[in-house]
Amino acid sequence: MSQSPVSIDNYVRTHDLLQEAIAGLSDEQLVWKASEKSWSVTEVLTHLADHNLVVSFRLREVLAGSEARLPAFSQDEWVAGQRANSAKAADVLEAFRALLLYNSLLFRRLSPEDWNKSGVNFKGLTVTVAGIAQAFIDHVHHHLGQIERIRQGEKSSRESSGAV
């Protein structure tokens, strides 16, 4: 329709950024964890795929005019409950990509009025479709930093154990 207030290209590009962030990591490096309570790279990717599912639902609830409070989700429990660290990172990223593409098709159909439709999130704050989409992009960027920190921690762990 008309110009989007959110960069749809930046939204879709989050997949490429995640691909680049994990490039060259072995299967062992993808599942390495600094501690039992921390996430591996694969678990971060799974969380982002889960978040993409939830955001997809939230967007559609707002666009449908629902007055229901937009749901939160228990990210740690979701990651643990689905045994995310046993998943293949490539499979998780493919699901993530499919949702990005599906939502991008929706975004391209939205009118300026649609982008401004609002709902109430789980914190009781009013959010717009544009705000939900932009927050998702920002959330992925936050986790790109987390992936880099995990990579550095894994590298330091290997170096200190002499496994380099």
Image (cartoon, rainbow, N blue to C red):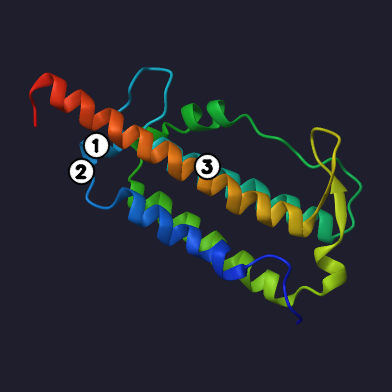
Crowd tier of the residue under label 3, counting other residues whose Cα lies within 10 Å: few below 14, some 14–19, many 20 or above? few
Look at 7% across and 23% down and name the residue there. Answer: 162
Circle nearer the N terminus (3, 1): 1
Look at 77% across and 58% down and name the residue there. Answer: 129
Camera-near label (3 vs 1) is: 3
Crowd tier of the residue under label 1, counting other residues whose Cα lies within 10 Å: few below 14, some 14–19, many 20 or above? some
Quarter of the C terminus within the rendering: top left
- Under mark 3, the amino acid is His
x, y percentage for residue 71? 75, 39
Labelled pair 2, 1 in contact (Cβ < 8 Å): yes
Which element carries disc 2, helix, strand or loop?
Answer: loop
Which element carries disc 3, helix, strand or loop?
Answer: helix
Q: Residue at the top extreme?
A: 36
- Under mark 2, the amino acid is Ser
Quarter of the N terminus within the rendering: bottom right
Circle nearer the N terminus (3, 2): 2
Residue on which the image places disc 3:
142
Look at 56% across and 43% down and name the residue there. Answer: 50
